[in-house]
């Protein structure tokens, strides 16, 4: 598998992204470093980091409409952790290595994600019930 850089972010599904931003900023001292609507996923995202922007980020995700998978997640499970994301240096080789190990993938090929990344998801059944995302930053 491609070298993992670190745990990139923990994604939290929320009903009101502005309210959640305020909570994480006020109580934990995190700051919003990027906001983006990702229409193809049906979500509004907000990435929060420490002042130094080092370490793992918190990604807040709010559905753009009631047809969003996140909307369905919120209906079924309520607000909370949706997935964790690991940064890799070569997502294609990471996916091939996982396939060789018999890991069930949601995405066999990466797709465009937020924050200038290519992303792919691993099925929770292969990860002890946790939805895992792999992300590779796209070179500018």
Image: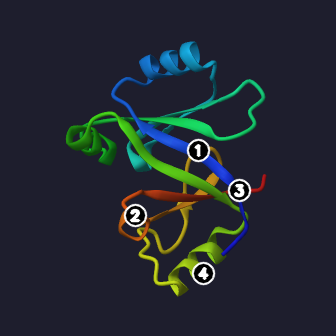
Crowding around mark 4 (Cα neighbors within 10 Å: few <14, some 14 to 19, many 20+) is: some
- Between label 4 and label 3, give the one nearer the viewer: 4
3D distance between C-alphas at marks 4 and 3: 20 Å
Where disc 1 sits, the SS reads strand
Q: Position of residue 113 (x, y in %)?
A: 55, 52
Crowding around mark 2 (Cα neighbors within 10 Å: few <14, some 14 to 19, many 20+) is: few
Disc nearer the start of the sequence (2/3): 2
Crowding around mark 3 (Cα neighbors within 10 Å: few <14, some 14 to 19, many 20+) is: few
| Residue positioned 56% across, 12% down in the render | 26
3D distance between C-alphas at marks 1 and 4: 22 Å
Q: In the rendered structure, are the residues bearing label 1 and label 2 in contact, judged by CB atoms less than 8 Å apart? A: no
Q: Which residue is mark 2?
A: 128
Q: Which residue is mark 4?
A: 97
Disc nearer the start of the sequence (1/3): 1
Write down the quadrant of residue 79 in the picture. Answer: top left
Q: Position of residue 127 (x, y in %)?
A: 44, 65
Of 28 and 48, which appears nearest the observer? 28
Tell me: residue 97, above or below residue 69.
below
Where disc 3 sits, the SS reads loop
- Point out which mark residue 138 bears: 3
| Residue positioned 48% across, 58% down in the render | 132
- Between label 1 and label 3, give the one nearer the viewer: 1
Of 55 and 89, which appears nearest the observer? 55
| Residue positioned 21% across, 43% down in the render | 76
């Amino acid at each position: 598998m491609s070298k993992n850089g670190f745990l990139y972010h923990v994604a939290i599904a929320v009903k009101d992204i502005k309210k959640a931003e305020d909570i994480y900023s006020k109580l934990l001292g995190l700051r919003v470093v990027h906001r983006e609507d990702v229409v193809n996923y049906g979500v509004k995202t907000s990435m929060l980091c420490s002042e130094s922007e080092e370490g793992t980020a918190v990604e807040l995700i709010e559905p753009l409409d009631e047809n969003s998978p996140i909307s369905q997640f919120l209906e079924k499970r309520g607000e909370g952790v949706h997935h964790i994301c690991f940064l890799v240096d070569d997502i294609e080789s990471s996916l091939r290595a996982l396939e060789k190990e018999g890991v069930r993938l949601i995405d066999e090929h990466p797709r465009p994600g937020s924050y200038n990344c290519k992303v792919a998801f691993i099925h929770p059944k292969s990860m002890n019930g946790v939805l895992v995302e792999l992300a590779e930053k796209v070179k500018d």
